[in-house]
Image (cartoon, grey):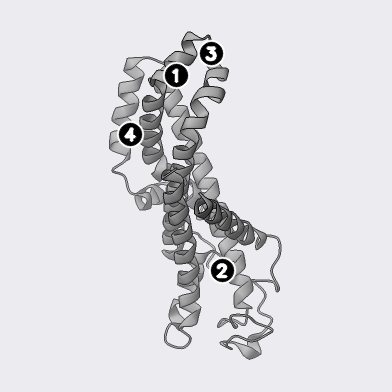
Amino acid sequence: MNGDRILNFAVTVVLAASLLGLVYTPYDPSAQSFRETAFAGSSMRHWVGVDGLGRDYASRLWRGAGNTVSMAGSALGISFLTAVALLAAAERLGRGVNRLIEGAIGVWVAVPVLFIGLVLLVFMQPSAVTLVLAAALGTVPLAYRQLRILWLEQRHAQYVQASEALGARGRQLFIVTLWPNLRPDVVALGKLIFAICVLELSGLAFLGLIGDPDFPELGAILRQNQAYLFRNPLLVVWPGVILCGLLTLVHMSKGSEGNR
């Protein structure tokens, strides 16, 4: 249990530190203020050096991590809200609607996020918002199916029937009886979908679908510095290390949550 708490605390600290990059960085991550020292290595002034355009690389990575985390969190929220709305419709609107939703989810799950992103680009401008919507819509089938399994397992459990026999109904039944048992699995599912959104968003940004070629996001930063791979490999290594570290930490904490 202590190990689980340490992992969850570590995830919280890392995500909070990443989001801090949205409001504070040592230097302006877009300002080309150090062109005379482009490609310089790490120093006391520039922790991980200067990129090819003379920008403090630590500031860009910090802002990029903040953008990646905030975009993935937004995609997770949209995905969960959509899945819950579909689940509520399937539960309340009858067997016909349930079959229709199940059929749509069966087709939807086969549609790759990249295709969804390309379809959205027909109607929207390339931007971070477009990528968030693509990642969110791409993960709705997974969120819906897993939430439905969890709901059906708990909704018909004997302890729920006992609570109903004692008079628990509606919100009281959900908050007092169902949610405490659903919460660990829902949190673990949220961490899984968050990790998937991080991967999908960074992948789409790396492909250039984010629009602004200078937008500081980890996948986009990786693409921006791809041309400097042989001149200064660390400019490519650092975004990958941060992405891998973030995903590894989330995965480890997801596993500990699921084992509770």
Residue underneath mark 3: 168
Residue underneath mark 4: 105
Image quarter of residue 56: bottom right
Image quarter of residue 15: bottom right
Q: CA distance from mark 3 to mark 1?
A: 9 Å
Among the two numbered marks 4 and 3 on one chain, the one whose residue lies closer to the N terminus: 4
Residue at position x 47%, y 9% in the image: 165
Judge depth for marks 1 and 2 and give the one in front.
1
Residue at position x 31%, y 28% in the image: 102
Image quarter of residue 64: bottom right
Residue underneath mark 1: 160
Q: CA distance from mark 3 to mark 2?
A: 55 Å
Among the two numbered marks 4 and 2 on one chain, the one whose residue lies closer to the N terminus: 4
Q: CA distance from mark 4 to mark 2?
A: 36 Å
Q: Are marks 4 and 1 in contact (CB under 8 Å)?
A: no
Query: Total marks drawn?
Result: 4
Residue 60 point in image, percent of width and height: 60, 71
User: Which element type, helix, strand or loop, lies under badge 4?
Assistant: helix
Identify residue type, mark 3.
Ala
Residue at position x 33%, y 49% in the image: 112
Identify residue type, mark 4.
Ile
Report the front residue among 208 and 111: 111
Among the two numbered marks 3 and 1 on one chain, the one whose residue lies closer to the N terminus: 1
